[in-house]
Amino acid sequence: MTIREIANRLNAKILTGEELLDTEVDGACGSDLMSDVLAFGDQHSMLLTGLTNPQVIRTAMMLDMPCVVFVRGKPMPEETLALARASGLCTLATDIRLFEACGLLYAGGVRG
């Protein structure tokens, strides 16, 4: 599934990285524990999380993830967005909760 299709499925706003919207994503990892993401996340998958701090971007960078989806409609700190822009990472924001967002993506064929 492309990041553009993910954004449409989650009714998500594109925050950074519009040039990456046609990038294919192989899977997803949904977590608010970055240690779990590092332990179980896969390269070329996306991260879904309710956290909005810069550590989320650093974690995605370490795993070479092209996209982070911020759930639950939380306000985004500019520091986090600036780091995402500097890293060339696509970020999306949706009002949907983590569980539902993961379910919608799973139903669309994205696997963990």
Image: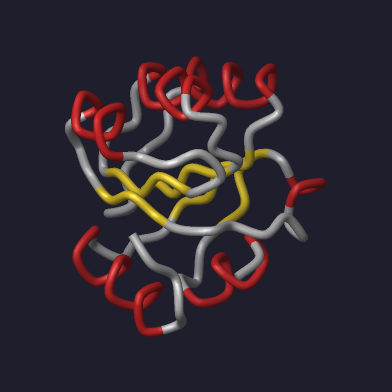
Question: Which residue is painted at 28% across and 34% down in the image?
Answer: 37
- The answer to which quarter of the image holds residue 1 is bottom right
Position of 8 compared to 71: left or right?
Answer: right
Q: Quadrant of the C terminus?
A: bottom left
Q: x and y percent of residue 60 in the render?
A: 46, 29
Question: Which residue is painted at 57% across and 65% down in the image?
Answer: 7
Above or below for 109 versus 39: below
Comparing 23 with 84, the one in front is 23
Q: x and y percent of residue 33 in the render?
A: 17, 31
- The answer to which quarter of the image holds residue 32 is top left
**Of all residues shown, which one is farthest toward the right?**
19
- Number of residue marks: 0
Question: Which residue is painted at 27% across and 54% down in the image?
Answer: 72
**Of all residues shown, which one is farthest toward the bottom?**
107
Above or below for 11 versus 86: below
Question: Which residue is painted at 69% across and 17% down in the image?
Answer: 86
- What colouring does the structure picture have? secondary structure
Above or below for 97 versus 62: below
Q: x and y percent of residue 21 in the render?
A: 73, 56
Comparing 34 with 44, the one in front is 44
